[in-house]
């Protein structure tokens, strides 16, 4: 039936079909986009605009758009103008560099009571990606004086803002929910990993009180490495969690010190759980050889399926963007890192996300999958 295990012809991992694995295919496509010249990028943008203008939709070229955005951080102004004329608001990242007049028109639409709530939902996302002071002031105003369309939405405008990497609290204080810089985690060696300032999945001696699974430092980050200056962390921090329980729960919060100490804040209400990972899973997780990439990449580099693991930048939220509130100060936390599970644990679906409140020295590890 063609289900015999075989080796990926590029990286050697076990797959159940002919050819190369999904990770390698993504990597090859990424390398193709990274090699495009300026003129080729312009031509590709033209191709995307053509589809929008001729068909009133972005379907055929949607994947190309996402690749150009994620890997090259293209200027989206031309695409935004074309999309707005045709009433296309997905994906919202189209509006990252939208022209002023387009943004103003969208803001006007949101101020109206009779805007359809579905449309308002899309406009909020698009404007969140564009960001800036005026959008922030409008979101604040909408949160304080909701329009009629707001009644049909489940969440307020502050929630939508996080899709663009920012939000604000009840007092109207602006905070960023993302770091601007992004570094990828790349395949390395055991020796390389020993020296890497970021490590994934280190064992600890602790066992989870709810399931008995080995507790891990899902990510260890040494902020003293010059590459990680943008994090503003003057030491070693460890995001500790039970990798078994976080899949079935709201995630694990932990308190950390910058000396590498970390303690899970136990959720007493969490039910006992079976340990599906077991010792084999922990062993596999701990033996990965991912290391921090040498150079920074574009902020959305890892923000798609098979995007891999990364530190900083934007996450690929499989469900909706999920910025948690710090259990100590109540303020929105900041997205710190993403781990694509199947790159470190064969057959495990989804991503883990790490968020941080540096004021309170608290991190959370949460999980999403389809
Ligand atoms: Zn492969
Ligand atoms: Zn557990
Ligand atoms: Zn806090």
Image (cartoon, rainbow, N blue to C red):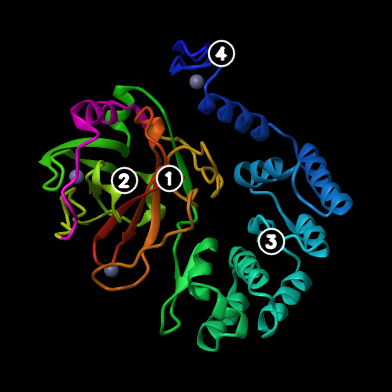
Q: Which residue is mark 1?
A: 369
Q: Residue at x 28, y 48 (%)?
A: 246
Mark 2 residue crowding within 10 angstroms, few (<14) / some (14–19) / many (20+)? some
Which region of the structure is painted magenta? Answer: 269-290
| 3 or 2: tag closer to the N-terminus | 3
Q: Answer yes or no: disc 1 within 8 Å of ligand 2.
A: no
Q: Which residue is mark 4?
A: 18
Q: Quadrant of ligand 3?
A: bottom left
The quadrant in which residue 88 appears is bottom right
Q: CA distance from mark 4 to mark 2?
A: 31 Å
Q: Are marks 1 and 2 in contact (CB under 8 Å)?
A: yes
Residue 14 relative to residue 17: left or right = left
Q: Position of residue 295 (x, y in %)?
A: 49, 38
Q: Would residue 222 be visible to someone looking at this image? A: no
Most extreme residue toward the right is: 54
The quadrant in which residue 64 appears is top right
Mark 4 residue crowding within 10 angstroms, few (<14) / some (14–19) / many (20+)? some
Mark 3 residue crowding within 10 angstroms, few (<14) / some (14–19) / many (20+)? many
Q: Residue at x 70, y 61 (%)?
A: 89
- When the figure is inspected, residue 147 is found, relative to residue 321, above or below; the finding is below
- When the figure is inspected, residue 15 is found, relative to residue 345, above or below; the finding is above
| 1 or 2: tag closer to the N-terminus | 2
- When the figure is inspected, residue 19 is found, relative to residue 69, above or below; the finding is above
Q: CA distance from mark 3 to mark 2?
A: 33 Å
Q: Which residue is mark 2?
A: 247
Q: Mark 3, mark 4: which one is toward the viewer?
A: 4
Q: Which residue is mark 3?
A: 95
Does the magenta portion include 274?
yes
User: Under tag 1, what secondary structure?
Assistant: loop
């Amino acid at each position: 039936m063609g289900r015999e295990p075989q080796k990926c012809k590029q990286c050697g991992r076990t797959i159940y079909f002919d050819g190369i694995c999904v990770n390698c295919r993504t990597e090859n496509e990424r390398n193709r986009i990274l090699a495009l010249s300026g003129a080729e990028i312009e031509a590709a943008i033209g191709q995307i605009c053509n589809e929008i203008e001729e068909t009133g939709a972005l379907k055929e070229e949607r994947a190309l758009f996402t690749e150009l955005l994620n890997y090259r951080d293209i200027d989206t102004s031309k695409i935004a103008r074309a999309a707005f004329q045709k009433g296309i608001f997905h994906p919202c990242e189209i509006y990252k560099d939208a022209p002023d007049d387009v943004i103003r028109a969208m803001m006007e639409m949101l101020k109206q009571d009779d805007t359809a709530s579905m449309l308002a939902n899309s406009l909020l996302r698009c404007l969140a990606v564009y960001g800036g002071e005026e959008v922030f002031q409008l979101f604040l105003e909408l949160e304080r004086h909701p329009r009629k369309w707001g009644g049909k939405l489940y969440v307020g405008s502050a929630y939508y803002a996080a899709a663009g990497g920012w939000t604000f609290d009840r007092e109207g204080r602006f905070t960023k929910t993302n770091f601007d810089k992004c570094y990828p985690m790349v395949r390395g060696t055991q020796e390389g990993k020993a020296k890497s300032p970021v490590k994934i999945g280190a064992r600890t001696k602790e066992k989870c009180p709810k399931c008995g699974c080995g507790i891990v430092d899902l990510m260890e980050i040494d902020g003293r490495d010059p590459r990680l200056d943008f994090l503003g962390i003057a030491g070693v921090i460890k995001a500790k969690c039970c990798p078994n329980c976080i899949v079935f729960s709201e995630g694990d919060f932990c308190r950390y010190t910058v000396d590498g100490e970390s303690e899970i804040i136990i959720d007493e209400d969490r039910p006992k759980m079976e340990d599906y990972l077991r010792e084999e899973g922990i062993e596999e997780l701990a033996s990965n050889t991912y290391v921090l990439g040498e150079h920074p990449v574009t902020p959305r580099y890892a923000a798609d399926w098979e995007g891999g693991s990364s530190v900083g930048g934007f996450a690929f939220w499989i469900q909706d963007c999920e910025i948690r509130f710090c259990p100590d100060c109540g303020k929105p936390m900041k997205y710190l890192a993403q781990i694509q599970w199947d790159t470190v644990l064969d057959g495990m679906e989804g991503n883990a996300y790490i968020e941080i409140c540096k004021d309170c020295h608290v991190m959370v590890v949460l999980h999403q999958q389809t």
